Image: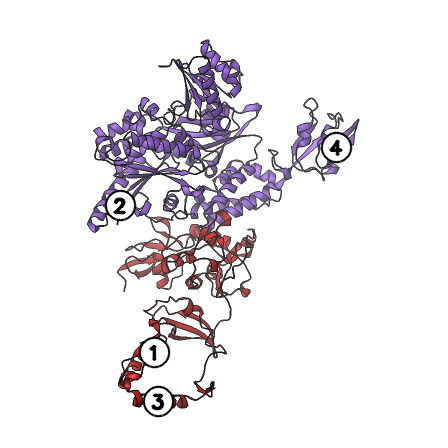
Chain colours: A purple, B red
Amino acid sequence: MPDKTVLVCQGTGCVSAGAEQIHISLEREIAELGLGGDVQVKRTGCHGFCQQGPLAVVEPEGIFCTRVKVEDTPDIAQSLLSQKKPPERLFYRDPLTGKVIPHYRDITFYSRQQRTVLKNCGYIDPEEIDDYLAVGGYEALRKTLLEMSPEQVIDTVKRSGLRGLGGGGFPTGRKWESCRRASQESRVESRESGRKTLGSGLQTPDSYVVCNADEGDPGAFQDRSVLEGDPHSVLEGMIIAGYAVGARVGYIYVRAEYPLAVKRLEIAIAQAREKGFLGKNILGNDFDFDIEIFQGAGAFVCGESTALVLSLEGKRGMPKPLPRPRTTQVGLWDKPTLLNNVKTFASIRWIITRGADWFAGRGTKKSKGTAIFSLTGKTANCGLIEVPMGISLREIVFDIGGGIPGGKAFKAVQTGGPSGGCLPAELLDTPVDFDSLTDAGAMMGSGGMVVVDEDTCMVDLARYFLDFTQKESCGQCSLCVLGTLQMLNILNSITCGRGRPEDIDLLIELGEAIKMGSICGLGQTAPNPVLTTVRYFREEYEAHIYERKCPARVCKDLISYRILPDKCKACMICLRGCPVEAITGGKKQIHMIDQDKCTRCGVCLDVCPERFSAVECIPGRLDNTLHSA
Amino acid sequence: MGEITFFIDGLKIEANEGDTILRAALEQGIYIPHLCYHPDLKPFGGCRLCTIEIEGRGLTISCKTPVEEGVRVITENPQINKARRIAAELIIANHYSECLQCARNTDCRLQDIATYIGIEEGRLQRLKRTVRDLPIDDSNPFFYRDPNKCVLCGICVRTCEEINGVGAIDFAFRGFATKISTLKDKPITESTCESCGECVDRCPTAALARKGSERPAREVKTICPYCGAGCGIYLGVRGDRVLSARGDRQNPVNNGQLCVKGRFGYDFVNHPDRLTTPLIKRNGTFVEASWDEALDLVVAKFKEAREEYGPEALGGLSSARVTNEDNYLFQKLLRSLGTNSIDHCARL
């Protein structure tokens, strides 16, 4: 047994920063020092702290090396030889206190988390089934098949209180129960009508289990990380689900944009088949189950259950309007279909092995267990986090996220991706669970969490998210496709300084109609970023419209740059840097910006030496007369 | 009549089990705005205009909700009207407003909706006009495809799939770029389209419109002359000219459906090359003759042949383009002449 293990993150973030080379180099260095027998170098999935990547962790001490480069690998290898710590420059430095923290358990980003679904991500090698087995993998499946009836499995999931972690929050156990019932009815029906066999003599399945891995929110990567870091936990959850609902075929609908996840899933499925966890007579039982991967073509709306099913059937993914039967009753190929998110399936093994009570003991009354977020934006620490349900937004932003860097003020947090809402500082104590977030006008969604500071324009932010949903609308509801287009046009004109007084009311009117009248979750939530920013940051909209000012100094048509005469040293740097020759002046002659020529590119501000700080950006438009006055 | 009784805006309605609320309402002459619904097709539910409230249950779309005994349907209230008005305004802001120049003027479902809602110019002006400027596909000799007038109701897509089983078109692209497209967005003539025109007939606007926008003065009920199927059609005529053809929905043979010939192949009627009198070949050239002359000649030749070679020497070739009754009489005639050699062009 090697004494030490170096875990080198091979998540997409770290890989794109060169982690594959680091792994190769580290292995070589260690071999050269003759440490091959004592130190094992292991490739793992995502550690979550992607901002600090590429990451390497030395176990068992739990020493956390950040921003590792290939050049650092000899030093890390040397430290292992000399039994010392790796050089301090690789350690995490607290962004606020500047303190160096060598162990990840001491970093607030990790210490305040409750990693369950993500427990093995960053710890095991996702391409080695033995690694998964070593941490208790497939024990839940074994327990299920040997000790539990399908009804008992469903009952356990029901009692655990698990709710769908794809964002919808539908009680998972109830979904499974309804699918099992429909599946049994379908089996009876097909037996009676004699349609059980296909021409080739193959049996047509009575029901399906489908894993929704069509993670499409911009900035969200929880599902990808789980698939890349711990693919077997998803497979195990799906197999248990298959046993519970009576399905023999499972599909994983994963975006083609996730090649690493697809590759690791393929490896995991092949290994699981080899070990007898997939295929015929699993673990010697009268239970067959197999899983296939289906790659989606990248349409956001295909994450919606009915659109996903259509896409899986090879058709254009467009959500089906209510009233219609649930997917659990009429789903893929019109058969009962259990559709759950990656994280939901990955939670199952813990519920089975540790029990429903253990799971139900965490979280809040109505939202049990943990929630996974991609924490991004203006926080000191960014990355993938798993927190108990009910934790406050404040704890996430200021403890785990480490607050806002650069002495800036917190402004808002957008939860739930483009479909979610923007919550202001007053709501920072909102508990993070399905119902509280929905009440506040936001949503859990797929788990994107974008923190913005005072330098972000809320109108521009709403415009950004709406631009995304507008482009991803499937085009079938006129309210959704045409309504979001009108809203986007309005936001564009507001940010360009052409906003009309009636625009705010029109945004609200359109937004509410779209929410009420759209078929699917995309349309029903697309106006959220606009409606919540209007609700909580109305004064910013009004400043754009009435004062022609962008208070956050983002919208180019509503800001100005000026040179402060008392600070300008007439050094000519900005004058030369200006791409449109808008700056006049000369040596020993104070510089001035011609506001008619200025394109607000900001080069003057960037190049003005910090010791002078003579250029400033201000909200609103100056004209030349005012400026000279 | 119906087995189920329910109420629309307090009015007692009888409907058949399995009917949707919208179908039942329309059959009773109660208009509920709709754009993507068509009685021949499965409900789609995209346009959201037919939203209604069922008392005690909340809002739903009437095109997909089946009738139930005793339910009380409300077709308008402030909440429904608000969303419906905005949906209609959005579609109208995205549509050409020059109705007089449109082939479907006064026969347009969008006009029905605009009339029902009652357009308020001031409200409409708040919205930006978003009509696209996409190329019109005029590759088909019989109809235009103008994507700028399309309301994305999907009726054409469903017609092609459900009625004709061809599937030549489908929704393509996303967001505002969504449109109805052939495979690889090629002209319709390069797709699997059979030009049956069923979609043209059902299109609620002029996104699919016949070439030639003249309307007939009156319609004549008749049978399509092309084949033995005998589809019922209405020919639209003005004086001697045939200007249109449409399927007879009451006709049990075709239930209103037609193929490309029946729907579009009527210009031969007024074509100058068409024969209008019998021709008799004299001295190597065809010369116009009266029916009496022509029939006398046929009788004379038949007699001559029969006397010289016997009745078996005679034969008759009939056509699928005449009626069953005519074909019956024709074989009767030939048999009375003593021959069984009777055939039919549809066997070729």
Same chain for the residues at labels 1 and 4, yes or no?
no
From the viewer's perspective, is B297 left or right of B3? right
Q: CA distance from mark 3 to mark 1?
A: 17 Å
Q: Amino acid at mark 3?
A: Val
Residue A556 coordinates in the image, percent (x, y): 63, 38
Mark drawn on residue A299: none
- Please state the chain letter of the residue tagged with numbered disc 1 in the rendered image: B
Pointer 1 residue: B318
Q: Amino acid at mark 4?
A: Met
> In the rendered image of this protein, does residue A321 appear above or below residue A225?
below
Q: Image quadrant for the N terminus of chain A?
A: top left
Mark drawn on residue B299: 3
> In the rendered image of this protein, does residue A263 appear above or below residue A82?
below
Asked if the residue at tag 1 contacts the one at tag 3, i.e. Cβ–Cβ closer than 8 Å, the answer is no
- Residue sitting farthest toward the left: A192
Which residue is located at x 40 percent, y 47 percent?
A319
> In the rendered image of this protein, does residue B315 appear above or below residue B68?
below
Pointer 4 residue: A592
> Within 10 angstroms of label 3, few (less than 14), some, or many (20 or more) residues?
few
- Please state the chain letter of the residue tagged with numbered disc 4 in the rendered image: A
Same chain for the residues at labels 3 and 1, yes or no?
yes
Q: CA distance from mark 4 to mark 3?
A: 109 Å
Residue A431: name its quadrant: top left
Asked if the residue at tag 3 contacts the one at tag 4, i.e. Cβ–Cβ closer than 8 Å, the answer is no
Q: CA distance from mark 2 to mark 3?
A: 68 Å
Same chain for the residues at labels 2 and 1, yes or no?
no
Same chain for the residues at labels 2 and 4, yes or no?
yes
Is residue A418 visible in this depiction of the protein? Answer: yes
- Please state the chain letter of the residue tagged with numbered disc 2 in the rendered image: A
Q: CA distance from mark 1 to mark 4?
A: 97 Å
Q: Secondary structure at mark 2?
A: loop
